[in-house]
Image (tube, rainbow, N blue to C red):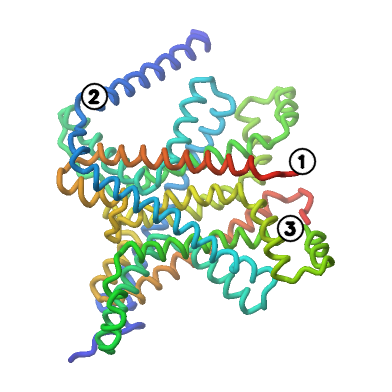
Amino acid sequence: MNTGTLKLIAKSLVVALLLLLLAGLLYWLFFASRWDWIGKYLPLLLNGLWLTLLLWVLSCILGMILAIPIGLVQVTGPRWLGAIARGFCTVIRGTPLLLQLWLIYFGLGSLFPQIAQVYPEFRQDFMWLIRLDAFWYALLAFTLSFAGYEGEIMRGAFLGVPRGELEAARAFGMSPWTVLTRVWFPRAVRLVLPTLAGEVVLQLKATPLAMTVTVMDLAGVVRNRITQDTYIVYEPLMLLAVIYMILTFIAVWAFGYLERRVPTKR
Amino acid sequence: MSAKPGFPEILALGPTGYGDELLWGAAMSLAIALLAYALGLLIGTIGALCKLNGSLLTRSILEGYTTLVRAVPELILILILYYAGTATLNHLLESAGYEAMAINGFAAAVLVLGFVQGAYSTEVLRAAMQAIPSGQIEAAKAYGMSPWLIFRRITLPAMLPFAIPGLANLWLIVTKDTALIAVVGYTELALATRQAAGNTKLYFTFFISAGVIYLIITLVSQKGFALLERRVRRGQRQLA
């Protein structure tokens, strides 16, 4: 037998295996899987989608706002401030987000009632802080995480703006603030736009962690409500995977559109 | 009121403190990360070679694999693969006449994380292999080298300088992704920490201690990868 026939046999085997797999999947999808729960849980799912989107978009925006000074002080600020910012980035990037989330939710969450026990006035004035929903703890954790990753990227971006442009801006008599808002920051953002797209997608893929601290986002609704009520495991998870995939593709497409809109000199 | 053990004592080794539980969890995390990383590299190398040299069929299968895995959150993938994988295996065992068995959580964690890492490694290694000037491979072919010899002597050493930064990133990601295994209930560092913190209510002490362990792993790995990169870049022109 020559190698040609061997290759053909191997190839047909792979194709047969794939077709079998596909047939199995289709059979499961149409005959064995159950989707009757969707109608009942649709309002909850939509609410979960809303929370997921809120968590994603808000943490990205707030994190970016934090990341700008974090990146900036590492480039031009006083040395001690730069060292603090660098340390913050190292710690955030060096530890799992799940651990940061748990530290903030369980740690801060248990701190406020303890303070209230010692100072009764605290309970009256800051009741809202003690009753705070898990969503806000998750938002804080995700914001800090995004700021840590993005601060490191912004540092590189601020460094990457050609010195001559900044000198030209100063030579025009611009104040440091005007230099930052008119030249330095807009140029830096253009440099990071492709990286930013990747980071935003990563942030979306981090949001299901919120379900571990009782947030009822999409993943929380699926795992902590649907699966617990109905004992259906796979179908909701599949739905979850498909929704996240769609959101990922939308984000990638949107950033691609944005990148094409930004004028660049080639 | 008897004094409860406070900050330094609670981290002691032995039955009075949680130090040994944390260290055992850290060892588990590291072992899972190492094996998953190795599995990911194996999948990645084969995947990258097939993606560059394979037929249209192989390439589309791999394209589907890498796109799908990279577009779905790791946590969801781990839940799907963990439950679906163990259930399918037991289903197959039962239909083949064997008894269903409890799946080893450690092995499942390694397989699941390795499968996810494989998709990312495939892309990193494919890009690195594409960066090799094609003339070098053609020259090797002209010398009559076998495909394996070309891979060992040309492709591997020439792509490593391009691949090491991406691979270093993947290692840092997998060490942190082991924490996700806590969600399916296997006791590694993150879950051990959460249990210890829940028992003692010393949340800050334990979560910060675990954070320090993760941070040490990260910083040591970064140092190691920097040395490795210098080694594979020897003989190249220094940048800046």
The 10 Å Cα crowd at callout 1, few under 14, some 14 to 19, many 20 or more, is few
Q: Secondary structure at mark 1?
A: loop
Residue A108 percent across, percent down from the top left: 34, 74
Q: Which mark is residue A36?
A: none
Going from N to C along the chain, the mark reached first, 2 or 3, is: 2
Residue in the image at 68% along x and 68% along y? A75
Q: Are marks 2 and 3 in contact (CB under 8 Å)?
A: no
The residue beneath circle 2 is A30
Q: Which amino acid, by three-letter code, is at mark 1?
A: Arg
Q: Secondary structure at mark 2?
A: helix
Q: Which amino acid, by three-letter code, is at mark 2?
A: Phe
User: Depth check: B157 or B215 in front?
Assistant: B215
Q: Quadrant of residue A65?
A: bottom right
User: Depth check: B65 or A85 in front?
Assistant: A85
The residue beneath circle 1 is A266
Q: Chain of mark 3?
A: A
Front label number (1 vs 2): 1
